[in-house]
Every structure is written in structure tokens, then in C-alpha cells.
Amino acid sequence: MLSVNGDFTGRPETQIYASNHEVVKIRRDLRLTARQADPWLRKVLERECKLEIHHPKKTWFYIYSEQDGVKLQDEEVLIGNITPRLRPLHKFLELKPGTKQARADALQAFSEMFRMYLIKAQEFEVKLDEGLSNYALDADSGLFYVDDELYEWDKFISFSMMLGVLIRKLDWLDRDFARALAKDLGKQLDQIFGDLNYRASIAYQLRSAFMPAGKKRDIANLICATLTDSPGGQKGDTSRISMGWSMPNAAELSVPDADSIAGLNAQGQVLSGRSEQTLDSARPLALLADVHANMPALESVLDWLQQEGIEQGVVLGDLVGYGPDAIAVVERLQSSGFYIIKGNHDHSIALGAFDRGLSKNARYVAEWTREQLSDEQLKWLKRLPPVLDTAQWMALHGSPLDPEFFYGYIYEMTYRENLDKLGELQRRLCFHGHSHMPGLYGRDAEGQDRHRTDERLSLSDFQHALICPGSVGQPRNGYPSAQFAIYDPEQDEVVLKALTYDHAPVVERMRAAGFPAELYRRLDRGV
């Protein structure tokens, strides 16, 4: 009864008995005795009642053995459930919707599936099985979850893979339907999670998925572009640029493969927080990270870059937090012309969500910082993209392994898995911050991994490399300096830089604002 693309798909251990009106599922994978079955079923029923995603007439049962009219408590039982027969979603969507109403019905079915999936992820931190065969419609087009299992929430990794499967499988999927689907998904993400970062997370992971060239790749790009386009922004509206959701045309990035750039908007533009200056991939690129609201440190770096004639750069997140100069740093970087991506401190402060990824001291400053910044500055931080991705390199705050891009650390215990991830993504280089430790983890052609912290780092020996420029405003390597790096693509090298600056005024402002002493003492020690 179970088959590929049939009405019923699933585990080989599951037996299905179906009539025109009911479906009985026997779960032979559940090896329980009668004594174990009662508490197990009570727990399952409690969970399903709480979730409210299954058909209300779904009924669990078990078949047990008796001897002389007495249930044999220690004998194995057969556990199953019975539900009304519904129309599987994968069968409903396999045929091309030929009329306007049929297209509307198909879009509504997808919308209900997305909504069910996203709400349960947000409420219970669980994920439903993404396969369309795990959802079904009743006669009134009500959608229900027909699988028995729940899974650990994986921050949209499986969801993004599911979108890729849909694109590859549904031959009738066209640009108009894909655009409407992505708009609906984006709206639901905003309403349910209230976090624009998830739009970019899904788009990035979808762009990393395998997709045949041609129509399928075009549809995937369009969905990514629609997801990452600014909600409510109009073409030519300068507020879109200030909020961080506009970039120049992909061709102007001078990278070999425009299709490999993540975060395209609906006009074929790439997602970033920056001004209209274009990126020349042949010229040196400044790498700044973890400014942490330290204006004197930032000014020393920007002055040096101006003297050296280096006009383009990437800021790898955490503009704010820890330090006292959030307003000045945001204003200065808004006018810098640099690509700017989001860090975990930026994210927490923009959302006013301080419970995750912040120490007690960091939380104190984050709450203080949110009170200092204007609504427009908070909105700008909120809409900064979490990742910049080209055919050769990617830039983020945390780590490539982290689907949210700014919580994961790259250090001795995690660099190997992150180098593996670069290989999967077919990206040679990753520029990152978050660790505050300048240096490189690289893997050569023989698969040997190396850690280097020299001032001048040649990249020619490495097939993949993770590069941290250190921290501009909160160094942690024992040197109290403003740290950054220069990536020279023509020389294929990164130069780590460290500038001395007068941090005494910053310390005084931190003291005056009542910051924890541990934070300003760090500036003296560089740890």
C-alpha cells in the first residue's frame, strides 16, 4: 500500500489499510507491550491535542492478547490509528492548475501548509515532516498533518531543502506562481517570527541547494529574490538603501557567476546594507568586524583606509554592543559606502530580544544601547542582511554552519566542520567575525588543516579558508589595538592590521554610563 508518488508513502514498517472512507495505519515499528502502550498513547494524545494539526477524528488504538479474558500486560501489542480518508497534498498539486481558480486553490494549499509548519516551529520549536505526502485536504479544503512524527527544529534547513524539491518536482511551477508563493511565505515569516533574518536564511540555503540550470534555477533565484526584497519598499526609494536591502546589479560585482550570489531582489539586485558604490573584485577589500560602538577605534581604521586609498570594504557585524558610541558608529558606517552585515548584538538590540547569545554584561549594554538609538536606526539594524555571498567568497558574522549566521563560533573545536561546510557550499573563502581573534583556519589541497596568525597570510596554499580580521573595538588576543584586515584578490592574500589609538575617552564614557567594569577594563588589556 506504500509506494512512491502513490496516495500513501512512508516507512516500510508501516502497514496501511484503506477504504473509500477511512485509512488505518498499523505502526509495526513500535515494539511496545500492553503495559507500555497505555502511557505511551496517553503522551501521544496529549501532544496531538496540544498541537491541533491532526484531523479531529484521528483515533489511536492498540490490539492486545488475552488469556482467559485477561489482558496479557507483558505481551507485545499492535499499535495503530484510524483517520478519515483525505486527499494527499502531493496528489492535489501534481497536476497543473489550469484555471485561475485552480491556481488560487493551489496557492492557498501551500499557504496553509507553510502556516501550519511555521506556527508549530515558532510555538513548540519542533518541525513537521516537510514532504507534501504528510499533509492532506478534507472535502472542505481544510489542511491536516497526517504523519505521526515530530522532529527537532533545525532553523529552516529542512524547510529550505523542501522548497528546492518542490521547484525541481513541480514542472508546472512558473514565475508568476513562484513569485506569489514567495510573497506569501515572506509575509508569514514576518507575521509569525517577527524577524526579517529568517527570510535571508531561507533564501541563502535555497540558493545553496542543487538546482538544474535553466528554468528551475531561474525559479529558485526568483523565490530568493522575492524573499529578500524589502517589505513595502519601492524601487528608487532611498529609504530602502538606508534600511539595508538594496545592492548594485549582480554584474557590477565582477564575479564570474552572477547566479551564485545570494540575496537577489526582484530587479536582479543583490542584498546588502550599503550605499550605491559598486564592488570591484580586483581591488583590495577592507574587512572590519566587531566595532562594538567604539568610535575612536573605528575612526582610526577609517582614517588609515582613506590614507591608503582603500575605498571598499565589508563590515562583518556587531556594529554595536559593549561600547558607548552606538549612535556615532551607526551614523558613520551608514555613510561609509561599505557592505554591512548583521551580528548577534545588532540583531538582539534591533529586536529588543536580549535572552539569547548575550552574557549578563553584554545584556546590560544591549538594553542601554536600544534606549539610545532612534527608531530609524533600530529599523536599519534590523534590516541588515546576515550574509553576503559571491562565487568565490562569503561573508558573515558567525559561521557557515549556523543557519542563522551570527551565533556560531569558529575556533579550535569547530573549524574543521566549518571548512567541510565551505566545501559543500563550493566557496573558497569565508570572512567572519564574532570570535574577535584575528587569523586563518585553512585546508590545503591534500586535506591538511592549518591555523595561521601571521600578519601577512598567503591564501594560495588553501582550497578553503576561514578568515577573521579580529575586532575593531573589542580585541581579545591580548593586544589593545583596533584590528582589521585587507583582502587583496590579485595577490591572493590577507594582511592583518592593528592600529594603536587612544581608548581612554571610550573607557571614561563607559564608566560614566555605568557599564560593568569588566567591559572597559578589557580595552586596557585587549582580552
Image: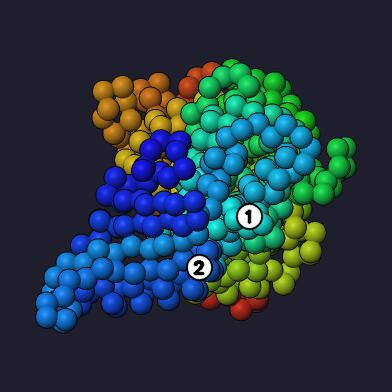
Q: Quadrant of the N terminus?
A: top left
For the residue pair 194 and 99, the one nearer the viewer reads as 99
Residue at left offset 29%, top offset 69%: 62
The reply to whether the C-beta atoms of the residues labelled 1 and 2 are less than 8 Å apart is no
For the question of whether residue 172 can be seen, the reply is: yes
Image coords of residue 170 (percent x, y)? 58, 31
Q: Quadrant of the C terminus?
A: bottom left
Label 1 sits on what residue type?
Ala
Instruction: Identify the image quadrant of residue 4.
Output: top left
User: Compared to 326, does 383 lie above or below?
Assistant: above
User: Compared to 196, does 423 lie above or below?
Assistant: above
On residue 154, the disc is none
Label 2 sits on what residue type?
Lys
Instruction: Please tell me whether mark 2 sits on a helix, a strand or a loop.
Output: loop
How is the model colour-coded? rainbow
Residue at left offset 66%, top offset 57%: 140
- The residue pinned by badge 1 equals 139
Image coords of residue 368 (percent x, y)? 66, 73
Instruction: Please tell me whether mark 1 sits on a helix, a strand or a loop.
Output: loop
Image coords of residue 57 (percent x, y)? 50, 68
Q: Tell me the CA gap for discs 1 and 2.
A: 14 Å
User: Compared to 91, does 56 lie above or below?
Assistant: below
> Disc count in the image?
2
Image coords of residue 442 (percent x, y)? 36, 33
- The residue pinned by badge 2 equals 57
Instruction: Identify the image quadrant of residue 216.
Output: top right
Residue at left offset 30%, top offset 34%: 450
For the question of whether residue 432 can be seen, the reply is: no
Could you tell which of marks 1 and 2 lies nearer the N-terminus?
A: 2
Badge 2 local density, few (<14 within 10 Å), some, or many (20+)?
Answer: few
